Amino acid sequence: GEGEGAGEGEGAAAAAAAASSSSDDAKHAFIIPTKVRNLSLHLSTAQYDIPYAVLLLLFESLLCVQIINRIPYTEIDWEAYMEEVEDYLSGERNYVNIHGGTGPLVYPAGFLYAYQLLRYWAGGDGSDVKRAQFVFAVLYVLNVAVVLTLYTLVLRQKRRSRSLDETKGEVEVEVEIEIAAAHTSWSWRVAMGLCCLSKRIHSIFVLRLFNDAPAMLLLYLSTLLFARSMWRTGCFVFSLGVSIKMNVLLFAPGLLILLLQSQPNLTGTLICLSICASVQLILGAP
């Protein structure tokens, strides 16, 4: 009986020692993750929003250069665009008579003005496609910069909303709140990073030179102006986007709802809409 008791005592002591050893090992095992977590919490704060976006833009700039230098340009619409601009520059003002290799001109007047300028930059006659690609690379980086700015504005608004919610109630664990805020920040930053990995958008801008590029840049810029409550300036820029490619007009119903909500009265909404219409009339008048 005494032998059995001693054996049981020794077994319990061994188990306790093993548990203590496992606990110590676990503590040491989590030293590095804790450091990583603290670093993640620190980097998730608002002071790193702009540096993070700048790093993404630098990455995009280098990526665009590599794409232009390594992936062959494929002709689809550029030559047709240049032919249509050539008709316009030769004095033709009747849309029915302006043609390119792909058929008649189907884009609004702003398209001709924009690609006239691009034609000048591309060797004067549009023949220097490589230079045109670099111009579109600049447009692409600007487009990404505007989109990342929009993401950052939303992220900061979510941070403010979370901060206000937390002040209303009792906070049990401050660390858990910090971790939740970091998760929010990094979730948005991952989404921002994914914006830089679209094969199709890179192709549209720097390999195909489609007019979607300047049109969408103007659309996102107008969205940023709307987010800053600059409604009239935003409507002007929005209409410029429509004048290059009319698919931007698909956003018009949503814009109308926002105008009705944001303007103090119907007159304010009508003024904004008149700005949109005036841009089209002025650009199309010639």
Image (cartoon, rainbow, N blue to C red):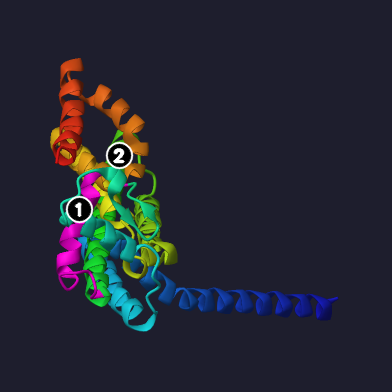
Q: Which of marks 2 and 1 is nearer the N terminus?
A: 1
Q: Residue placed farthest to the top in the image?
A: 266
Quarter location, residue 89: bottom left
Mark closer to the observer (2, 1): 1
The quadrant in which the N terminus is found is: bottom right
Above or below for 223 versus 265: below
Disc 2 to disc 1, how far (Cα)? 52 Å
Q: Per the image, is 164 magenta?
A: no
Which stretch is magenta? 107-128
What amino acid does circle 1 point to? Tyr
Horizontal and vertical percent position of residue 122: 19, 71
Q: Nearer the viewer, residue 212 or 102?
A: 102
Quarter location, residue 54: bottom left
Binning the other alpha carbons within 10 Å of mark 2 as few (below 14), some (14 to 19) or many (20 upward) gives few
Classify mark 1: helix, strand or loop: helix
Name the residue beneath numbered marker 1.
Answer: 88
